[in-house]
Image: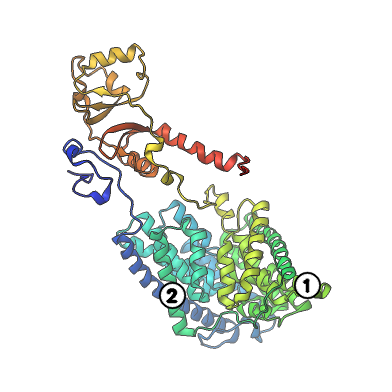
Amino acid sequence: MTGAPSPLQQPGEGLPVAPSLAPTLENARIPLERTVVDGRVALISLLALALGVAAGYLAELLVRLIGLVTNLAYHHRFSTEFASPAGHHLGWPAIFIPAAGGILVGLMARYGSRAIRGHGIPEAMEQVLLNESRIPARITFLKPLSAAIAIGTGGPFGAEGPIIATGGALGSLLGQVLSTTALERKTLLAAGAAAGMAATFGSPVSAVLLAVELLLFEMRPRSIIPVALASVAATGVRFSLVGIRPVFPMPTLATPGGSALAIYIALGALVGLASVYVTRAIYWIEDGFEHLPIHWMWWPALGGLAVGGVGYFVPHTMGVGYDNIQAILSANLLGTGLLVLCLAKFLSWSIALGSGTSGGTLAPLFTLGGALGALLGGLIAAAFPEAGVDPRICALVGMAAIFAGASRAMLASAVFAFETTLQPLGLLPLLGGCSAAYLISALMMRNSIMTEKLARRGIRVPEEYSADFLDQVLVQDAASSPVVTLEADQSLDSVRCWIEAGADGASHHGFPVVDGDGSVIGVLTRRDLLEASHPPDAPVRDLVHRELAVAFGGNSLRQAADHMVREAVGRLPVLDAESRLVGILTRSDLLEAHTARLASSEVPKRTFRAG
């Protein structure tokens, strides 16, 4: 038999069929039993491990490349050691270095690929949603090269965004070279992206959560296992290259009290409010560039002039700025200096990102959120010293909360702040602050900084991940019964007379055809029965030309719905464990099953009963 497994030959692929009736149903097509993991998952996991190792070394290569460009552009030396543009001694001519980098990025985008513009995650999301996770191969080298030029010439971006995009492109490329399904390519893309983030910050858990919340749009074993393995492998590579110390080391924090915890949650809400206006400002500036009377290729150069101008007065706004984040979290940057850095960094980054150059959003957002949290925390600690508020925890909460509000990756944000500081006592304030920021952002803003661009293109991004309702309902609980059947030996003419007379059950659109012993041999529709080309005296069994597709009462509605799609049918006879016909499942039954789901989520009601 081709196209469907035999119930007796492969009992693991479907519900068992009674042996006595197996010959009758030997050619029947039955729903496949879905497995949690299989051999393909093991294969994808092995590929993800290799991908994680590759992403780990790619991350180091990109950091070295950024260092090389920075040293050449600002310090006039050939070195790949990481350096900050802030230490240059070039004077006012340094204003034009970011603009020169913007020209190069614009040329690469115009004649290489326009997809290198931006921070990479929305572009990866678009490929997942619309293009079966197929990213052009040239992005694998154009994205890191353009980012190295943009950041190395002073762009106020983090290296993590381009590394995440490059890792995702590498995973997609691997999935295209090999024979994979679209879902497997999505998993490899997410694994590469997560590995890129893990390799940058040594944060494997938050990298997995970020992939789930922004790229996978699901949490299933067949996808989460490869992504987790890739993140572990990339982190292992990072540890072997740079050690296991946290990216943003902090002094040891004290346990927060009840009053302080409440303030940290309120602080998260305030930072969440700020994330809304930061996101709106980014797209307002981007819209402004859209109205310029010059080709978009030149926009990064204009953004570069703004970066250079701001950087001339506040040099620490240029480059990745990881040292700024560490200084903020350690309370080494306070007062006016902190306020100036926050405002100048926002101005420089928002204009540069709005111009469409290549760079990341995570590090700039962490800088802004950390600075805002530290400023508010300092004011609160001075005004209410009895509350026991620690400005360093406020900075930590602000850093995570602004990303949670802007991106809606709440869990990834909270865990990331912990993994990069290794301060377990900060976890509780982080979770409360990020939750509050998420709440405020979701109430005030329809889309996030990651999805607004896609929404403007008419792309709908999943917002909620929940268990499949159809997978929780059994066919036997939704199927229609009793079943109106046709005898296989009935003449077509008698059936037509029965339909025309409008007898009970004659209005149905499909009818199972049963043999003399009650076995189902097929399903006929009204269209089949009323087709004029069939001779009136032909037995009904002669009209059955396609293999029988059935479902069992113990199948889930998801299995049955998938089975309908595969078989291109609108109804399935339903059999019990003894292969007796007990009902019929139609597309209307599938829709009707959602009534309970909608009622449970949309109709508030009291359910309390005393006693």
Looking at the figure, which quarter contains the N terminus? top left
Secondary structure of the residue carrying tag 1 is: helix
Query: Of callouts 2 and 1, which one flags the residue occurring earlier in the amino acid sequence?
Result: 2
In the displayed structure image, the side of residue 33 where residue 393 appears, left or right: right
* Amino acid at dot 1: Ala
Q: Which mark is residue 234?
A: 2
Residue lying at 18% horizontally and 25% vertically, measured from the top left: 516
Q: Secondary structure at mark 2?
A: helix
What amino acid does circle 2 point to?
A: Ala
Q: Is residue 298 above or below residue 386?
A: above
Image mark for residue 387: 1
Q: Nearest to the eye among marks 2 and 1: give it.
A: 1
Instruction: Determine whether 448 is above or below 548 in the image.
Output: below
Q: Is residue 137 visible?
A: no
458 sits to left or right of 551:
right
Indicate left or right for 337 with 408 as reference.
right
Horizontally, residue 393 falls left or right of residue 409, namely: right
For disc 2, the neighbor class at 10 Å (few under 14, some 14 to 19, many from 20) is: many
Q: Which mark is residue 207?
A: none
Query: What residue do we see at 69% from left, 77% from top?
Result: 392
Q: Residue 455's spot in the image, x, y percent?
A: 56, 50
Q: What residue is at 33 percent from the left and 41 percent from the top? A: 563
Decide: is 221 above or below 3: below
Q: Which quarter of the rendering shows the C terminus?
A: top right
